[in-house]
Image (spheres, rainbow, N blue to C red):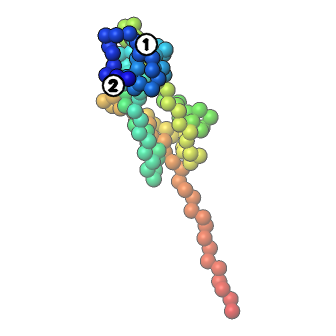
Amino acid sequence: MSLIPSFFGGRRSNVFDPFALDVWGPFKDLSFPSSLSAENSAFVNTRLDWKETPEAHVFKVDIPGLKKEQVKVEIEDDKVLRISGERSVERSSAKFLRKFRLPENTKFDQVKASMENGVLTVTLPKEEVKKPDVKAVQISG
């Protein structure tokens, strides 16, 4: 058995040969859209950071090249934050959708969103944690 593949000869079929050319490839039968540009590919793989501060939950989403009219920020059933967007350019388009289950201490009626330099910032204020009332009890005796 040769250690160098035979590119000029026929196909090799020895399953123990690491250079065999007819080895099954898990991705060989999958088709990928050729119209997905590098710009749209970056858009589909949207990056997001979630930071919790004592006052709020803050989401920052990188969506360069999008206008605020192309982005939706929604709250489903006071439990889930949905951030979605769509870009259509000439003959190609790209979409993204991210969902996050939120803690119950979120003030859903005070959510704010802003967009600057291709970064969407969504701020969800948190309810104040009520401290339990503590009363001193006199010890007798």
* Image position, residue 58 (x, y; %): 43, 42
Asked whether 50 or 17 is in front, the reply is 17
- Is residue 70 something one can see in this rendering? no
Tag 2: amino acid: Leu
Looking at the rendered structure, the number of numbered marks drawn on it comes to 2
Tell me if residue 26 comes above or below residue 120 in the rendering: above
Considering every residue shown, the one lying at the far bottom of the view is: 141
Q: Identify the mark at residue 33; answer none if there is no mark.
A: 1
Give residue 88's position: percent from left, percent from top.
Answer: 41, 13
* Residue type, numbered disc 1: Pro
Instruction: Give the residue drawn at x 40%, y 33%.
Output: 47
Q: Quadrant of the N terminus?
A: top left
Q: Give the side of residue 117 with respect to residue 31, left or right.
A: left
Q: Position of residue 117 (x, y in %)?
A: 30, 30
Q: Residue at x 60, y 64 (%)?
A: 132
Q: Secondary structure at mark 2?
A: loop
Numbered badge on residue 3 = 2
The residue at 32%/13% (across/down) is 7
Name the spot of residue 21 as percent of width and height, x first.
Answer: 40, 17
